[in-house]
Amino acid sequence: MRRAQTLRTWLEYLRQTERLATIEKQVSLQYELAAVTKKLDGVKAAFFKQVEDYSIPVVSGICSTREQFAEAMETDPYDVIRRFTDAVASPLPCKQVGNDEAPVKENIIREDIDLMRLLPIPVHHEKDAGNYLTAALFIVRDPVTRKQNVSIHRLQVTGKNRLGALLLPRHTYHLYKQAESAGRALECAIVIGVDPLTLLASQASTPFGVDELEIAGALRGEPLEVVRCETVDIDVPAFAEIVLEGKILPHVREPEGPFGEFPKYYGPRSDKEVVEIMAITHRHQPIFYTIVPAGYEHLLLGGIPREASLLQSIKQTVPGVKAVHMSLGGTCRYHAIVSILKRNEGEGKNAILAALANSFDIKHVVVVDEDVDIFNMEEVEWAIATRFQAERDLVVVHGAQGSKLDPSTDEGVGSKLGFDCTIPLDSEPMRYLRVKIPQYEGINLEDYL
């Protein structure tokens, strides 16, 4: 069985490799669970066996390093973007199974839906407006093409069976507006507790009409098993822990937020779309999964798919691009580091412009030669310090669209910078020759200490 076949097989793999912290002490959903998870961020996943007032355990931090996503793909960190790009290019159709083959149908609840009574949904940050689902796949279907769209949205519990949803103007929002204009609700399924690769696939940047569950199958190397919901025409992962079946109500908006977002600031309160839940299905003894916003898990989930899209975009302009990295310090959204094999002067600046054009979120771009390890920020800073002169190597763009969640912008409009840290092709060979100690790589300190 593949280590990332289901959430449970992945947790067992983390346990076997001593990267799952099991917390026996009872914890509160109000901040305490998030605080403990944050303390373990990047070190271990947190499995909370006893959550105050609930019998359902909670897990968080299941993939908080790039290495863990690589392990889920059963490859190395440097191959992650290639594998992800290949999966996006060649989706694998899902395998339909019946209820008797789908653990997520072991329990079906249609009456008396009360989300906070049934599920341990946390409050993460001090000023958050309430309890939030942060790690649920949000699945809708295009009624014309029958293709599904999978994404993740912040979902605030606003009533017994109601959720306030932040729907950004992307594929799910497009389908919702089509339904709303016809006076119809848009059916949806909210899936909690899947394997890391299905989670990662949900964040792929794809043309409209590509089903991210099929990308998940390609990442896994085998079709993802799915089952039809009970009350809506949606297919969901058969081995998920919990599924909420519902609909986005037409012409209804209710207050949602504030909520602590990926830039480590709060997204504001405003009137948002509303989801009404009609049924819940779940496995026996389900595990609830949450992501602490702005933690490594949250940032990498957004960053890795963005890297794949960015690499493809830059390659159209600079064929010698080798790798890209959306850095944690830039919240995996705002800072891009790009490695190129420069063959012509000016390619560094072209790579900067291509990166800025890829996503309005990108604010600062650093382009370096391929000898610089772009995943080592000390190396990147060294390249800026020794290979960059603002007079000739700085690219500045004012008045560009940026992220509205960046508080330094003017309602999302701001400046962008590019740093061309590539070595001039006509430079004298010794001028940029890196110092090197012969035999360094072969030294074993145990022979000397």
Image (cartoon, rainbow, N blue to C red):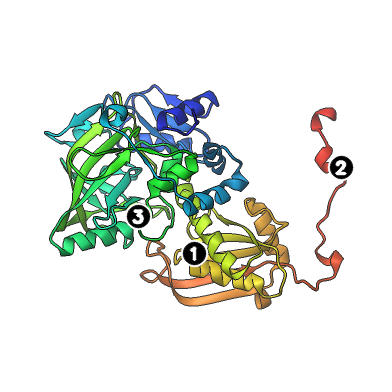
Give the image quarter of residue 133: top left
Please report the residue visible at 53 percent of the width from the left and 51 percent of the height from the top.
86
Please report the residue visible at 26 percent of the width from the left and 59 percent of the height from the top.
175
Label 3 CA crowd tier, 10 Å (few <14, some 14–19, many 20+): some
Using residue 245 as the reference point, say whether residue 87 is left or right of it: right
Q: Nearer the viewer, residue 342 or 377?
A: 342
Quarter the C terminus occupies: top right
- Tell me the tag on residue 439: 2
- Tell me the tag on residue 362: 1
* Circle 2: element type: loop
Q: Position of residue 94 (x, y in %)?
A: 38, 42
Please report the residue visible at 45 percent of the width from the left and 33 percent of the height from the top.
5
375 versus 120 height, above or below: below
Q: Kindly tell me whether residue 330 is visible in this rendering.
A: no
In this rendering, which labeled residue sits more in front, label 3 or label 1?
A: 1
Q: Which amino acid is tagged 2?
A: Gln
Q: Nearer the viewer, residue 60 or 187?
A: 187
